[in-house]
Amino acid sequence: SMSICLRMCLEIPVADLTRYLKSLKSVFQFMDLSSKHHMSKVMEMPAQQVVMLFAALEEGLLCFDSGVCMQCFTAVDNICTYFYTARHEQSEEGERVRRFLTEQPQSLRKHLTLLLEMVVSGEFNSMWSVSRPLLSLILLHDQYFLTLKEQIIQTQVEDKRVVFRKALDDVMVSVEDSLTSKNRDAFTRNLYQFAQSLKSTAAGAGPGVPTTPPPIQLPLAITS
């Protein structure tokens, strides 16, 4: 069955798969398809194996192969979109999602932290690809996102913090608590403008703010 195949894939360390590019691509393609069409089955697996899926996708986001990275962006968005929709359902699926979000919040927070670091550091050029899962993650963990924003702002030199805060605040301008295509597109435009402003700053075209803050540390006490 699908769940058995997925469990087998998760048993293979990603570090080992990187030696065999064809196998690496096939495994992450399967994870992408599973997250798109079979999330109800995925959530029937033990919570620890779902955590392993997130951990594998996190490694995939940092993969040297751009195709694998794109598959992981899509898979993370598929999962988070499913969570966003199912978390309010009064059903067995909804209960599984709520339990996972409550008991394993760090799985999603790590991805939110990683994607924000990618945007701020300029490590990934396709803002469209980053923006899709990033919005889903922000809406699922809105309070944690605010905490991350403050951490990023505090890494800036003091006289640049006001400018940087305004730039980060603008990312959520006109963005609502929904995952409609219109709302996603608004967020993507804002994120693109933010990334462009950082590039212009780095090139000396505007009031400067550093673009490579230290890695963000995960605060453990945030509950949402």
Image: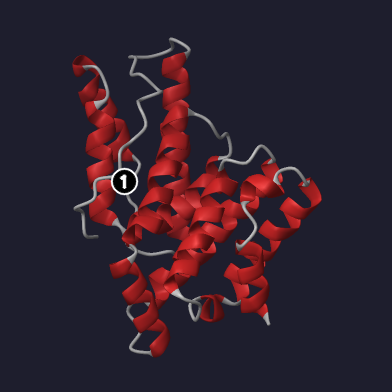
Q: Is residue 167 left or right of residue 4?
A: left
Q: Is residue 128 left or right of residue 139?
A: right
- Placement of the N terminus among the 4 image quadrants: bottom right
Colour scheme of this structure image? Answer: secondary structure
Residue 137 vs 189, above or below: the answer is below
| Residue, disc 1 | 173
Q: How many callouts does the rendering have? A: 1
Query: In this view of the protein, which residue sits in the foreground, 22 or 168?
Result: 22
Crowd band around label 1 with a 10 angstrom C-alpha radius: few (<14), some (14–19), many (20+): few
Residue 5 lies, in percent from the top left, at: 68, 73
Residue 33 vs 69, above or below: the answer is below
Q: Residue at x 25, y 30 (%)?
A: 153
Judge whether residue 176 can be spotted in this image.
no
Q: Residue at x 53, y 65 (%)?
A: 78
Residue extending furthest bottom? Answer: 91
Residue 218 lies, in percent from the top left, at: 30, 44
Residue 224 lies, in percent from the top left, at: 24, 60
Residue 48 vs 73, above or below: the answer is below
Q: Residue at x 48, y 54 (%)?
A: 133
Give the amino acid at mark 1: Val
Residue 88 vs 190, above or below: the answer is below
Residue 219 lies, in percent from the top left, at: 24, 46
Q: Is residue 73 left or right of residue 187?
A: right
